Image (spheres, rainbow, N blue to C red):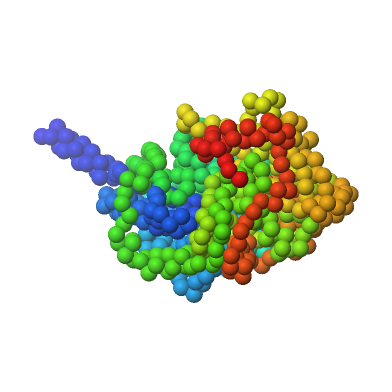
Amino acid sequence: MKQLRILFLLLLAACTVSAATREVKLKFIETSDIHGNYFPYNFINKQEWGGSLARVYSFVQEERKTYHDNLILVDNGDILQGQPSAYYYNYIDTVSTHITADMMNYMGYVAGNMGNHDVETGHDVYDRWISQCNFPVLGANIIRTSDGSSYLKPYEVIEREGVKIVILGMITPAIPAWLSENLWAGLHFDDMEATARKWMEIIREKEKPDVVVGLFHAGKDAGTMMNKYRENASEEVARNVPGFDFILMGHDHRRSCKKIMNVAGDSVLIIDPASNGNVVADVDMVLIVDNGRVTEKKVQGVLSDINKYTPSPDFMRKFANQYSEVNDFVSRKIGTFTESITVRPAYFGPSAFIDFIHTLQLQLTGADISFAAPLSFDATIHKGDVEVCDMFNLYKYENMLYTMMLSGAEIKGFLEESYAMWSNRMKSPDDHLLLLKKREGEANGYTFANFSFNFDSAAGILYTVDVTKPAGEKITILSMADGTPFKMDKMYKVALNSYRGNGGGELLTKGSGIPVEQLKDRIVASTDKDLRFYMMKYIEEKKTLSPQPLNHWRFVPEEWTVPAARKDSVLLFGDSYKR
């Protein structure tokens, strides 16, 4: 009898322990760098395309059937810029609820994060968007200059089945290197690693979380910009700041999913879904909870293909009116081009595409010289009617137009830095004209070794680029465009976009040798609206235009560069370029 009683007590104890131990399954889904791709339609090229929030919602709804409230949907920034759908509700319809807030609320996001292109829209836009979101938009390292407080909520705390989760949000601190100060007036951006250390200590002491997630608008391959800003420091933070269970990345548009070991010897998942909602970061977490305490955690991540899903009919019905509004906006005729213009020739010499931008910049500012680069890798505006949508091909970003004062020597240094990133040093006629590299993961196909949006050419001066010379010795400036002498010690008015004028691409800092702190002192004028606005206005006033190359520069020696250009064009685009 006594033995039966002992057996009964042992069984009762086992049942009690079992009841106190439970498994909690969580799913985290991250979108990042959506860039206005809300609908499965490209309003710029007027064609169906992949990704989009409409498809993401189909995936999320399917997964919610299993995970219910344990599915945690977050966004990692750069959602307010890119497609005309974002532009329209940023600057045209500023009365309605912002489409981005409306959609994110509908989809059930629990947290957002600021990206650099969200900041690019300006205080009026992102402050309105944030105020209309039913969830916090995070930014632990976005700091008020007035009192040192956080401009946005540093982290969000959520609970699921008794599990306490903290999501810490940060942005790349290099904003001042790219964006005009009026867009982020009253703010500064702290280093990511220092910020993570500060808030991890606060979070551990105050919140005592079971799970800590980093939501960082920064990629994994860190580099220092202007000897000042540590960009793409997500992996550094994951390694050097213990306490994160996983880190959701963005900003660099590069798919990544891997585990690393931090300095404490713990495994940390870092994952990045690239851009446009073609894939999402999909993280499964299984926790063992024993008497209210998490005793075990398992984290697995994958990049889930969203293009396997059809756009959500419910989503499309809900936002049908907004779709129509945007489509009407981009379809408005603003003028006529008598010739087609394409970006492709711009990599090999003067082009009607880039020289149209040069011409406009010179006319708007009255500057002596203009700098401009291809902002889209491969874009065409066909002859005939020019519509609003074409302006997003002509000029991809919402940059302001600056006028700056630069010396002749600084102008030459600027161009030397640009063409050093752009052109190869040819040692024989068989060499590449351009600095190229094989495309990642592809047996065939080439792309540029550096970002083509930093390939600035100039107008207003006549010059050659000798590709047989080393970097720093390629440029020979012959004269001003009107034939008058160009002088190295003379100060010139130069028109360029705000990204470049703030130090973007480091052409002014590395190339011209101007310290970053002195750049603002060189700015003598700035537009109050983006360049695309003035381009549309210019075309509407002129009605009919025939864009032509200005022919202010050329690669030399031409007996090498012309055949090499044809070969490189085939490698890049599949056919030889035409002027």
The outermost residue toward the bottom is: 95
Check the image and report above or below for 571 versus 532: above
For the point 29% across and 59% down, the residue is 313
The answer to whether residue 158 of the structure is visible from this angle is: no
For the point 48% across and 30% down, which residue is it? 444
Q: Kindly give the residue lying farthest to the right in the view shown.
A: 489
Classify residue 358 by image quadrant.
bottom right
Viewer-side residue, 454 vs 101: 454
Where, quadrant-wise, is the N terminus in this rendering? Answer: top left
186 to the left or right of 109: right
Q: Which one is in front, 370 or 253?
A: 370
Residue 401 horizontal/vertical position (percent): 68, 60
Which residue occupies the extreme left position in the image?
A: 1
Of the pair 269 and 539, the residue shown nearer to us: 539
**Left or right of residue 57: residue 337:** right
Q: Position of residue 9 (x, y in %)?
A: 19, 39
150 relative position to 405: left or right: left
Answer left or right for 299 relative to 266: left
Q: Residue at x 67, y 60 (%)?
A: 360
Query: Would you identify the image quadrant in which residue 179 lies?
Result: bottom right
